[in-house]
Image (cartoon, rainbow, N blue to C red):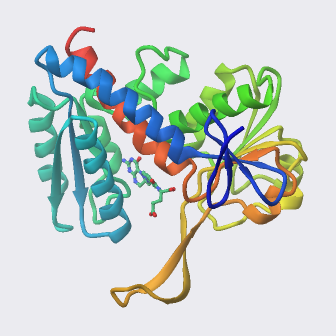
């Protein structure tokens, strides 16, 4: 028995059963709120012991989407009881200046997590910048040490990238709800980025799935996708994955956040936009067993996992 919402019926496990279509909509917003509540409680214990988890976010340039994400990260950090600082740098900032700021944050005992918002505009080399972040403060999990710890399966020591961690959190919850065993399941990840595709593949391997990592050069993507009991879409192309490619009964995690123009103007007179994922959701709903919506799926979990990583970094700093 659940609670009626605008889009369906919400049950106790955070899964939204849509009124139309047959798939379950996996409610990432609700799952993230639950996780943030537990993070805030654990943060309070640290704070009582004299250590306030601190998160520094660096934003270069004025990309409006990045500004929205960074603001939301700052608000969420404060809501968890964290110390939150934001460094807004002009697009003209040099690589040396960014490295300088990171060196200061690495040495700052009030900061336990450092996030360099990507993509970086201008000429700075993102690899060099990410490698300059102290691995213990790398709450994005992008430093080669953390990527390596994940690759060798040292999940306790690794800081795991936030979107992949959020995806598997929703996946574990959904698999338990549906009574699906991930061991031996066919998992297809579309997209091979260091931020999303590669780490998700590692996490799925650790759950004993048979993992295929597909990408833009893969031949016959529809045929590969149609084998998937579990599909992770992280390609960044709006609604590219069509419903009839999806295996009936599959679990679908849609990582895409694509902003498309919509009709009309907002209250402030700007052109309206709408968010869509990498999967054609309406079509997918008629085939999949469960799917993460966009918005309200993986996105909110990404931010919750950033807070979870910051808390972990602060706990490690405290020797816990
Ligand atoms: N170093 C780095 N780490 C990141 O984790 C990182 C990054 N750079 N650059 C950009 C992407 C994007 N990203 C999102 C986080 C939350 C939502 C999110 O909460 N989305 C809401 C909707 C928000 C909206 O309306 O725009 C949702 O899906 O429901 C989306 C996207 C983190 N990123």
The one nearer the camera, 206 or 300, is 300
Residue 216 percent location from the top left of the image? 69, 57
219 left or right of 89?
right
- The residue sitting at 9% across, 31% down in the picture is 108
Residue 80 percent location from the top left of the image? 28, 36
The quarter of the image that holds ligand 1 is bottom left
The one nearer the camera, 29 or 302, is 29
Image-quadrant location for residue 199: top right
Image-quadrant location for residue 84: top left
Reply above or below: 253 against 51.
below
302 left or right of 111?
right
> In the rendered image, which quarter contains the C terminus?
top left
Image-quadrant location for residue 168: top right
Residue 9 percent location from the top left of the image? 69, 49
- The residue sitting at 72% across, 37% down in the picture is 1
The answer to whether residue 65 is seen in the rendering is yes
253 left or right of 64?
right
The answer to whether residue 162 is seen in the rendering is no
Q: Number of labelled discs?
A: 0
The one nearer the camera, 83 or 92, is 83
11 left or right of 313?
right
- The residue sitting at 23% across, 17% down in the picture is 45
Residue 78 percent location from the top left of the image? 22, 42
The one nearer the camera, 295 or 204, is 295
Reply above or below: 106 against 195.
above
């Amino acid at each position: 028995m659940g609670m009626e919402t605008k889009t369906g019926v919400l049950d106790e496990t955070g899964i939204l059963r849509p009124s139309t279509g047959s798939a379950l909509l996996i409610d990432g917003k609700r799952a993230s709120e639950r996780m943030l509540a537990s993070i805030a409680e654990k943060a309070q214990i640290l704070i009582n012991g004299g250590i306030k988890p601190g998160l520094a976010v660096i934003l270069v340039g004025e990309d409006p989407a990045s500004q929205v994400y960074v603001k939301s990260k700052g608000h969420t950090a404060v809501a968890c009881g964290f110390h939150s600082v934001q460094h807004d740098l002009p697009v003209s900032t040099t690589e040396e200046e960014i490295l300088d700021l990171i060196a200061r944050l690495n040495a700052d005992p009030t900061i336990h997590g450092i996030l360099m918002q990507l993509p970086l505009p201008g000429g700075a080399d993102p690899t060099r910048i990410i490698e300059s972040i102290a691995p213990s403060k790398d709450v994005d999990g992008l430093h080669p040490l953390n990527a390596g710890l994940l690759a060798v399966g040292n999940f306790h020591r690794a800081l795991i990238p936030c979107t992949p961690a959020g995806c598997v959190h929703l996946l574990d919850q959904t698999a338990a709800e549906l009574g699906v065993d991930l061991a031996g399941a066919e998992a297809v990840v579309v997209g091979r980025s260091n931020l999303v595709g590669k780490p998700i593949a590692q996490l799925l391997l650790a759950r004993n799935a048979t993992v295929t990592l597909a990408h833009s050069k893969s031949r016959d993507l529809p045929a590969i996708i149609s084998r998937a009991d579990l599909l992770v879409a992280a390609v960044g192309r709006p609604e590219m994955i069509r419903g009839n490619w999806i295996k009936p009964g599959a679990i679908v995690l849609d990582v895409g956040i694509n902003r498309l123009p919509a009709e009309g103007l907002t209250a402030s007179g700007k052109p309206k936009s709408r968010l869509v994922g990498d999967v054609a959701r309406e079509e997918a709903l008629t085939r999949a067993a469960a799917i993460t919506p966009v918005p309200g799926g993986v996105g909110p979990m990404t931010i919750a996992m950033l807070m979870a990583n910051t808390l972990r970094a602060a706990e490690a700093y405290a020797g816990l």
